[in-house]
Image (tube, helix red, strand yellow):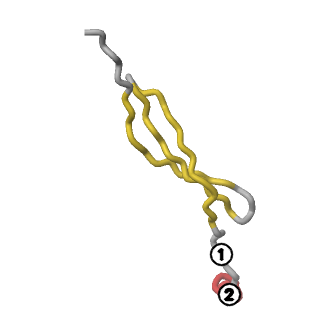
Amino acid sequence: MRILKDLFLKKRKQPMKKEFVATAVGYVPWGDGAAEYFYNLYEYEDGTRECEKFDGAVLYHTRKCGF
């Protein structure tokens, strides 16, 4: 019976609060252009950090032709 009490009466850890820090933008070469990526940066209460990656637009370089 004591085992059941220990299992059900223990205080569970609450999930840590995640706080938004900033959004960063990055570009990756892709063919004749570049792919754009967004990174949302988060920080937890204990100081650890995490990021989430989101795809952005695909940018193309237009070349000037002499004809």
Q: Residue at 37%, 29% (x, y): give it.
A: 60
Measure the alpha-carbon separation of dots 2 and 1.
15 Å
Q: How many numbered marks have been drawn onto this rendered protein structure?
A: 2
Q: Residue at 49%, 31% (x, y): give it.
A: 28
- Pointer 2 residue: 9
Label 2 crowd bin: few (<14), some (14–19), many (20+), radius 10 Å: few
Compare residues 67 and 54 and report the one nearer the observer.
67
Picture coordinates of residue 12 (x, y %)? 66, 78
Kind of residue at badge 2: Leu
The residue at the far front in this view is 67
Picture coordinates of residue 23 (x, y %)? 56, 51
Picture disc at residue 14: 1
Disc 2 or 1, which lies upstream in sequence?
Answer: 2
SS category of the residue bearing label 2 = helix
Query: Horizontal placement of 52 versus 15: left or right?
Result: left
Q: Please say if 58 is above or below 31.
A: below
